[in-house]
Image: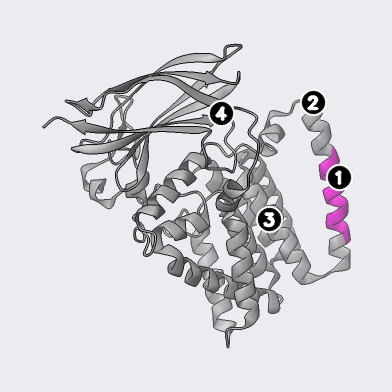
Amino acid sequence: MTPITLGLAGALCIWLAVFGQAHRVWRIFIGCAGVSVLLLSASRGPLLAAVVGIAAGLLVQSSRRVLLGVGLTTMLATTLTMISLKEGNSLLTRLVQSDTNGRDLVWSSTLSAYQSSPLSGVGTYLLGRHLQPPSGCELWIGPSGTPVCPEWLQNLGSPWLIAHNGALQQLAESGPLGTLGFFILIGSVVSVAWNSKDALGIAVLSGLIAATLIDNTLVVPSPFFAEAFWLIAGVQLSRMTEIKLGHGVAASVLIIILAFPIWVSSVPSKPTLSAQLRFIQSPRQVGSAQNYTVYSSWLLTPGKYRIVMRSCLQSCSIVQVLPVDTGAQDIINLESKANIRDVPMQKIQLQIYPSAAGASVLPLTTHEWTVRLKS
């Protein structure tokens, strides 16, 4: 049970408390429990899901009394939040941070996987093969301190490694046509729930869809939340008699919103940090894929960065992420060492990213070369 899983459990309890039909005492109890679990998880995705779900459900209910009460509660919560942030509350500071926790690198690798099969995608549940490191399957940390995976799981291709974005996951696995079909289905489900005035249904659906901005909350099997989504979706589909224009409009809006890493990266922006390669010593032919070492010198704007080494065949996989703090210096000498793929020939990329992970998948700079293994 990850913090995200617990946070979504809390969000689901809140939706049941606000829009469920159970006895008031039970709803108060489950609502308080849900708020506690949600805040203690310190996970921003479930918090976003909870807020979006509540807002969507209230819009469906259109109850002025409820809207007024929620408005007053929101104002009070915002005031208390601002006071807590000024006093340095670490939990609330974590919840309002905009850093994507390295998801920009995952999104970049996902787009690289999509570019390897731009028409059909790489296949359902097969994205993990492209996201896993050259060392292969990783599931947990073994007694030796290194990631290990049982032999019987090796051939599954790490399906638990996800894109952390619903639109990119679908695009990489099923291509443009599959993505379009998937979102027409989702758009139809949301439209029917909205037109049916199903407050609980629209809260669960919209909240879990919002969470797919930075996670994959619709992929089954899951620790319960994706199953909850598809159960609610099945109820809505049983009410649908025809496909309407509104279903396509809803699908288009969802695709545009959820695919934000793509269009954010395409918008020109002036970076506050800059990186320029001064010198690199990168072996082009080696006898072993183990401990491949690169020495480089960079001219950097003083600040914090991530040095990323990737191994590329049809798609690129991360083999090392090295945090760097330049301090007051502008010239930094680095040693990058990692295990690359054990194949006759591959491309190696050395990239510079800002330390603070944002929505853009583009690095500050990339240097690429070809490496051959001696037979």
Asked whether residue 306 is in view, the answer is: yes
Nearer the N terminus, badge 2 or badge 3?
3
Q: Is mark 4 on a helix, strand or loop?
A: loop
Task: Residue type at mark 4: give it.
Answer: Ser
Tag shown at residue 355: 4
Nearer the N terminus, badge 1 or badge 3?
3
Tag count in the figure? 4
Task: Residue type at mark 2: give it.
Answer: Glu
Quadrant where the C terminus is found in the figure: top left
Cα–Cα gap, marks 1 and 3: 18 Å
The residue labelled by disc 3 is: 14
Residue 349 falls within the magenta-colored stretch: no
The residue labelled by disc 2 is: 87
**Magenta residues, as a range?**
68-79
Cα–Cα gap, marks 4 and 2: 26 Å
Q: Is 345 left or right of 13, judged from the image as shown?
A: left
Q: Tell me, yes or no, whether the two marked residues, 3 and 4, touch with CB atoms within 8 Å.
A: no
Q: Which residue is drawn at 67% across and 64% down?
A: 203
Tag shown at residue 76: 1
Where residue 249 sits: x, y (%)? 64, 73
Q: Residue at x 77, y 67 (%)?
A: 59
Q: Which of marks 3 and 4 is in front?
A: 4
Tell me if mark 4 has few (under 14), some (14-19) or many (20+) residues whose alpha carbon lies within 10 angstroms of its own.
Answer: some
Task: Residue type at mark 3: give it.
Answer: Ile
Cα–Cα gap, marks 2 and 3: 28 Å
Residue extending farthest left: 375
